[in-house]
Image (tube, rainbow, N blue to C red):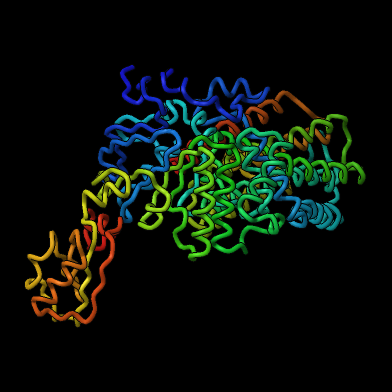
Amino acid sequence: MSDPAANVTNVTPTLVHAKGLTKHFGSFEAVRGIDVEVSKGEAFGFLGPNGAGKSSTMRMVSCVSPRTGGELRVLGMDPETDGPKIRARIGVVPQQDNLDTELTVRQNLQVYGRYFGLSRSAVRAKATELMEFAQLTERADAEVEPLSGGMKRRLTIARSLVNDPDLLLLDEPTTGLDPQARHLLWDRLFRLKQSGVTLIITTHYMDEAEQLCDRLVVMDGGRIAAEGSPSELIRRYSTKEVLELRFPPGEQSGDEVRDLAERVEVLPDRVLLYTADGDAALAAVHARGVRPVSSLVRRSTLEDVFLRLTGRTLVD
Amino acid sequence: MTNETSTDLPAPSPPVTPRHGAGLLLRVVPPGLYAGRAHVLVERSYLVSRRGWMSVISGFFEPLFFLFSLGYGLGQLVTTVEGPGGPVPYAVFVAPALLAASAMNGAVFEATFNLFFKFKYAKTYDAVLATPLGPVDIALGEAAWCLIRGGLYSAGFIAVMLGFGLISSPWALLALPACLLVALAFAAVGMAAATFMRSWQDFDLVQLAVMPLFLFSTTFYPLSVYPGWLQAVVQWTPLYHAIELMRALTTGYVGWGALTHVAYFAVMVVIGVVVAARRLGKLLLT
């Protein structure tokens, strides 16, 4: 087979290879031909607004959703024919927790391990270890339902590790969590990455992507809009710094400063100047006699890239 | 299909080797649908039932209440009824029918409620299908659990029948396996039906199907009560076959016709499991 993923000269093996991958639901095209390569040990991100096709892609990679067209190989196998073999070696954290509400925390981990064919004694040991990892030991024999959102999420992540997966798929792992819970989760994911687990994460939180991902793609409308490391993307699609000028609503037009930056964006209450040197731009603004209510010079973030690529209008 | 990359990757950590005994099914069912690990679903159900044992026990008493109310209460008035081999006391006539009906009731409600809840609300099966298990594992595992539970109830009821002298033949030893077959058939069809349900309101339809079966399938009086054409209709319904089978076994008048009953349920099992597994796969693996 002529498979580009099977490049033997490649030192790090490719765990996920997709080429022209599509997914249709009836006449709706959720994924419209994407090319993705994820290497072993990498933390790879899918960024995009709701409805961009991130979850559909994740479901195809986790072998619970047949692809409509294109190539897809996961761990070197075809999900269509080797679904169970692939699923045996991956961990999945779905967008919505689907913990077994009829079982306790410990039983959730044990029973899930049994689904993977682990022995009863092996799952007992594994459950203890994973509850430690997810800081759930004190709730070991508690029901799942009354747990907080953060605890449930941690349990779902712990559950996804029960088979020591080579590849971990996390669909919006921290959506809906408070900052403490998010940071704890990030810490756990970072540890997993350190221990060599390959991560694929979807998110629409830019700080999450910057924290966790070595490389990412921005998806929009079922297609890939950009690809690279967070810093590469910022370099390519934004400027080093951003000057934000705040005006009373309706009093800014941006016209008087338009030539002071590479790109100027006018929002209802603010004007954003994308420039390499924010302080210089601010000085130039003041020199023109423009008097904003307040001003702020900051570094460009992935959020600027994201909004530039996917637009500011609401998608769904 | 082998791929060069796969040699670079570590060997699969958990073994995917199927269990012994699952061999035949593994060969006929496509690999994505069946991992030969249905017994793990039974383990799960057992763990759940340990926490809610009251509801498990309650299922045992229902047919007993019917037996005392009808067999002994109504039996005072009716005295004897025409059984398979001549007139028998009413309790002897009605007890095997209640045995069959309880196997049906237990299996149908366990299968439909349970499956519907887990598949529509708890999303239990979405999590299961993210593992190597497939929809056939789920369908078989859940059917097997219905069977174990139903089997315990049936065994209890048969013991009570024996204690009250309502069993007059060693053929009754086969009543328990017959109950298991009947329960499996109703569970399989119930599971298949559950995959078509849209909301809890649809369970009224289950009730609507089960109630007339319970009342009219020669449970309380012999088939000869009906006019000829209605007899023909009743003879096509599933509970009729279950009741006739049980009655033949507990009274000892077993003919070749018993095999027809067995075949009827075997067909039900196959249709139910195939439809349930297909529907689960279609609905959950989109």
Question: Could you tell me how many numbered marks the image carries?
Answer: 0
Q: Quadrant of residue A118?
A: top right
Q: Is residue B200 left or right of residue A235?
A: right
Q: Residue at x 37, y 44 (%)?
A: A56
Q: Is residue B206 visible in the rendered structure shown here?
A: no
Of residues B281 and A226, the one drawn nearer to the viewer in this rendering: A226
Residue A142 locus on image (x, y percent): 69, 59
Residue A250 locus on image (x, y percent): 15, 80
Q: Residue at x 28, y 38 (%)?
A: A34
Q: Residue at x 83, y 45 (%)?
A: B156
Q: Is residue B105 left or right of residue B273?
A: right
Q: Is residue A124 left or right of residue B174?
A: left
Q: Is residue A172 visible in the rendered structure shown here?
A: yes
State which quarter of the image contains the N terminus of chain A: top left
Residue A240 vs A60, above or below: the answer is below
Q: Is residue B271 left or right of residue A7?
A: right
State which quarter of the image contains the C terminus of chain A: bottom left
Of residues A164 and B210, the one drawn nearer to the viewer in this rendering: A164
Q: Quadrant of residue A17?
A: top left
Residue B266 locus on image (x, y percent): 63, 29
Residue B10 locus on image (x, y percent): 52, 26
Of residues B44 and B257, the one drawn nearer to the viewer in this rendering: B44
